[in-house]
Structure formats: structure tokens, C-alpha cells
Image (tube, rainbow, N blue to C red):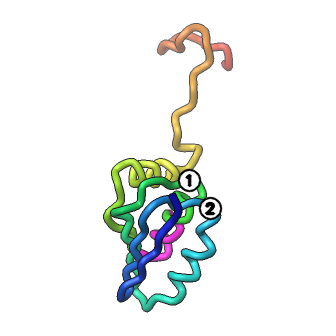
């Protein structure tokens, strides 16, 4: 399936799949719209990581992203979190209990 773009009075409705190869076309459509622009993702079925990053960039610029499916919204949220904030995997071995010296000390 491909991407269908339906612009209507500042709202751009997407249907189908939003992939990296569509982003230039989407950016051009956003530029043609009068502000404020709303991206309507109600009928969007599939996205790739570049599309998720693009949607996050849009929100950061004040472009409203609406009617997202829960999996897209969750993915967007996870992608926004800085890498340093993600939990680190523990090294195998003894758990560091209070009062005990670990391998790194």
C-alpha cells in the first residue's frame, strides 16, 4: 500500500503507509498549507522510524499531530526520550547491595 495525502483547509489527512521515501512530498504539502497545519493520522496504518522522527520534529515545530493510533503515539514518545534517560542493562554477576563493594569500586 502507498501513502495517500488529502489536504483540506490546513488539515492534511494521511492514509496508508508513511515511509521515509514519502517525507519530501509530505514536507512540500505542509509548506503549501496555511498555518496552523494539522496532520491527521487516523487512517495511517504503517510508519517507519524516519516517519516517527519526522512526526516528532513536526510537533516540536508546533504542527499538531492528531488522531494517532496508540502504537504510533507510543513509538513517538519512546523516540523522543533521550538515550541517556533509558535504563542501562546491569552487568551479570552479584547485585550491588548497600554496604557491599561492587566490581567498579
Main SS class of the magenta portion in the image: helix
Residue drawn at x 53%, y 12% is: 95
Which of the numbered marks, if any, corresponds to residue 20?
Answer: 2
Look at the picture and state if 62 lies above or below 15. below
* Residue 5 rendering spot, x and y as whole percentages: 46, 74
In the figure, is residue 15 to the left or right of 101?
left
The residue segment tinted magenta is: 56-63
For disc 1, the marked residue is 48
- Give 79 or 100, whichever is nearer the viewer: 79
The outermost residue toward the front is 1
Say which element carries label 1.
Answer: loop
- Give 103 or 37, whichever is nearer the viewer: 37
Magenta span has 96? Answer: no
* Residue 22 rendering spot, x and y as whole percentages: 59, 68
Say which element carries label 2.
Answer: helix
Residue drawn at x 49%, y 75% is: 61
* Residue 49 rendering spot, x and y as whole percentages: 57, 53
Residue drawn at x 41%, y 60% is: 44
In the figure, is residue 73 to the left or right of 50?
left
Q: Quarter of the image holding residue 65?
A: bottom left
Amino acid at each position: 500500500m502507498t501513502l495517500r495525502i488529502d489536504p483540506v483547509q490546513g488539515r492534511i489527512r494521511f492514509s496508508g503507509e508513511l515511509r521515509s521515501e514519502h517525507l519530501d512530498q509530505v514536507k512540500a504539502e505542509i509548506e503549501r498549507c496555511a498555518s496552523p497545519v494539522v496532520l491527521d493520522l487516523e487512517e495511517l496504518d504503517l510508519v517507519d522510524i524516519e516517519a516517527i522522527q519526522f512526526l516528532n520534529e513536526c510537533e516540536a515545530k508546533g504542527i499538531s499531530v492528531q488522531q494517532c493510533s496508540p502504537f504510533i503515539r507510543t513509538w513517538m514518545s519512546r523516540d523522543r526520550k533521550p538515550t541517556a534517560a533509558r535504563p542501562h542493562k546491569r552487568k551479570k554477576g552479584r547485585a550491588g547491595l548497600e554496604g557491599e563493594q561492587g566490581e567498579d569500586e
